[in-house]
Amino acid sequence: MRSANLLNDFAFKYVFGEDCKEANDALKSLLTVFLERKVHHVVVKNPRLDLLVEFDDRTMVDLEMQLRQTQDHLPIRFSYYLARLHSSQELEGKYYGELKETIVLVFFNVNLIDNNRMCNTFTLKNEDGLSFVKETEDRMKIRTVEMAKLDVNKPLKEMNEQEKMIYYFLNCHKGMDDSKIKVMIESDGVIQMLEKRVETISDDGWKKIIEDFRKLHENEERMERQLEEAHKAQEEAKKALQEANKLSQEADKKVEEANKQVKQMVRKMYEDGFSLDQISEYCSLNVDEIQVLIKS
């Protein structure tokens, strides 16, 4: 059993995103199978970060292998990725109708969608399932692939192309030790192509991938902690501000009540015949302030 594992995000990006013909052919096969459209030409934009792909018709695809559950909500995260990808298009001096299609294609090894479909496509629709735009004009899509829904005991001859590729993703680390993998490697051209890419990952190369992967996750976890701490500090500051506003309002109310009582007392003393000087000495107010209170 070999060490390389395609469920590792870095290994996934290496196999499909490296700048070579073999990786590019493997990527075209992957996109053809899971987007269910013929792919003739693709360009990988940034294989070291997100695996961002542009088709020959300028369709943009953000390809993600997401295994680790993070503290934030994954569907919301990928909705943000789609919005960011779609808005990255240069539109100055153009019509909105010239916007190209953008797709976030996500592979999960968990169950997130409450149905039996391994692959689901999400677009803009209303409560009754009515599309906001015509299907041919819908240019924002999230395509999810829930690998955990695969029936791994299903006979190989009954699996479709998507199921075969997912089975390979889940078990490629077993190599020829897995009977289904062995048959696929010997008879399936697409799997043979993927296998050649996986075989290029040496043990030393895999150690480096794992180390890079570890550092990436440590950075993600640190950023998540910092974000959580910042959010907590923000909530505490908001709470403190609300408390301060409450105290300020209470103080203003008390000052207003005290001023009212002073005004009533000054008027009463004046009506009882006290001179302005006597009132001033008693209330610690100057004569002008007393006159204002009396007249108001």
Image: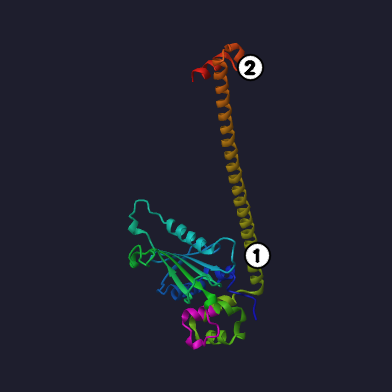
Establish if 40 lies above or below 230. below
- Image coordinates of residue 37 in percent, x first then y, are 40, 73
Q: Is residue 225 visible?
A: yes
Question: What is the three-letter code of the residue carrying label 2?
Answer: Tyr
Question: Within the magenta stretch, is there residue 232?
Answer: no
Mark 1 element type: helix
Residue 242 picture quarter: top right
Q: Report which residue position mark 1 lands on.
A: 214
| Residue found 37% across the figure and 51% down from its top | 92
- Image coordinates of residue 120 in percent, x first then y, are 45, 72
Establish if 139 lies above or below 114. above
- Residues shaded magenta: 150-167
Total numbered badges shown on the rendered structure? 2
| Residue, far front | 272
- Image coordinates of residue 8 in percent, x first then y, are 59, 70
The residue closer to the viewer here, 114 or 85, is 114
Q: CA distance from mark 1 to mark 2?
A: 77 Å
Instruction: Say which label, 1 or 2, has the lower sequence index.
Output: 1
- Image coordinates of residue 177 in percent, x first then y, are 62, 85
| Residue found 60% across the figure and 15% down from its top | 279
Question: Within the magenta stretch, is there residue 164?
Answer: yes
The residue closer to the viewer here, 164 or 274, is 274
Between label 1 and label 2, give the one nearer the viewer.
2
The numbered disc on residue 296 is none
Circle 2 crowding by C-alpha within 10 Å: few under 14, some 14–19, many from 20: few
Mark 2 element type: helix
